[in-house]
Amino acid sequence: MIFRQLFDPQSSTYTYLLADPGTRESVLIDPVFEQVRRDAALIAELGLELLWTVETHVHADHVTGAWLHKQRCGSRIAVGAASGAVNADCLLAHGDHIEFGRRALEARATPGHTNGCMSFVLDDHSMAFTGDALLIRGCGRTDFQQGSPHTLYHSVREQLFPLPDACLLYPAHDYRGLTVSSAGEERKFNPRLGGSILEDDFVGYMNNLGLAHPKQMDVAVPANLQCGRTESPAAGAGDMDWAPLTYTFSGIWEVHPEWLEEHLQEVQIVDVREADEFDGTLGHIPGALLLPLNSLAARANELSKERPLVMVCRSGARSAQASVLLRKAGFGKVANLAGGMLRWHAQRFAVDGGND
């Protein structure tokens, strides 16, 4: 099975991509609004078809990317029926299955953090995605959104702890950089729920946490009750509609040579190679400005922030770095030439200098 664990540093949220390698059908668990372009780029690069986005619960610390994925690629949204969310394509009940290719996730109701919390267990019980019901050596809080420590205690003890010892547990969040645990570990070592801890012990612990509410709660909860539905453009789009750009999993906007060859007069072309390369074997794109990467930051004021910028180097590596540098410097319309001069030359587009 294809499996990727992704991370949003702002909310410390894990997003999980699972796919059947045979059919290339996939499911995305707990997508984050601001990371939709990242996730979509990975799905495209791996050649997958996104069938489902699945929510473990109505989150209070980030807005889901489910609706944007639905708009972008036609994926369907699944969320627990008890969550109260609208705009979902499937309201899950305990025991339902989400199928992707020859694989499936079993939905298990694990309320307590919220009423609508669901955990998802892979068909062979090798993995489980526990949302906030069970974290690595911890659990989700129970002091808002219909939370109940009594309910959460029984959810974990009855639905998650009976999983096989070796079943890997993947939570919705971790704030210490931990990535995975197992049912056996948490059953034995979880300081809130493991070992011989009784329900009254757990309730007393949870009722005295004294935590502040999440900063994004007033925005995130209403948005997530709508499954993230918005009329706004996808997160991160900004000024990037000036060309048919693609966004890579590494976070780089790219433009393809075919488009650039037809629109040379509409953009600023910045070649970040050294002078000997600029006039060397591959030549350079007509009208390109030579600004070597090591001097780009100091000379950025020579560029206009109004006209789009296309960054160029031999292979696209240095120019990718240059595009990131300029975006950080406040240039909104910046893209990297995919494949660099190697691809431009291979497609026999016009160059100044160079040789065949």
Image: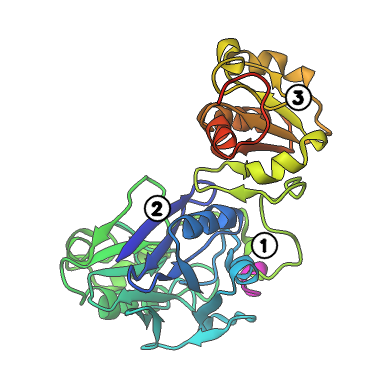
Residue flagged by tag 1: what amino acid is it? Asp
Mark seen at residue 287 = 3
**Figure check: 336 above or below 168:** above
Residue flagged by tag 3: what amino acid is it? Gly
> What is the distance, in whole Å, between disc 3 and disc 2 at their CAs?
49 Å
Q: State yes or no: discs 1 and 2 in contact (Cβ < 8 Å).
A: no
Mark 2 nearby-residue class (10 Å; few <14, some 14–19, many ≥20): many
Q: Earlier in the sequence, mark 1 or mark 2?
A: 2
Question: What residue is at 62 percent from the left and 29 percent from the top?
Answer: 312
Question: What residue is at 60 percent from the left and 11 percent from the top?
Answer: 275
Mark seen at residue 174 = 2
Q: Position of residue 144 (x, y in %)?
A: 54, 69
Mark 3 nearby-residue class (10 Å; few <14, some 14–19, many ≥20): some
Mark seen at residue 275 = none
Question: What residue is at 24 percent from the left and 72 percent from the top?
Answer: 198
Q: Earlier in the sequence, mark 3 or mark 1?
A: 1
> What is the distance, in whole Å, between disc 3 and disc 1 at their CAs?
51 Å
Residue flagged by tag 2: what amino acid is it? Asp
Instruction: Classify residue 153 as left or right of residue 45.
Output: left
Asked if residue 225 is among those painted magenta in the image, a careful observer would answer yes
| Of marks 3 and 2, the one in the foreground | 3
> If the image is split into quadrants, where does the N terminus sit?
bottom left
Q: Position of residue 135 (x, y in %)?
A: 35, 61
Which residues, given as a range, are shown in magenta? 223-227
Mark seen at residue 218 = 1
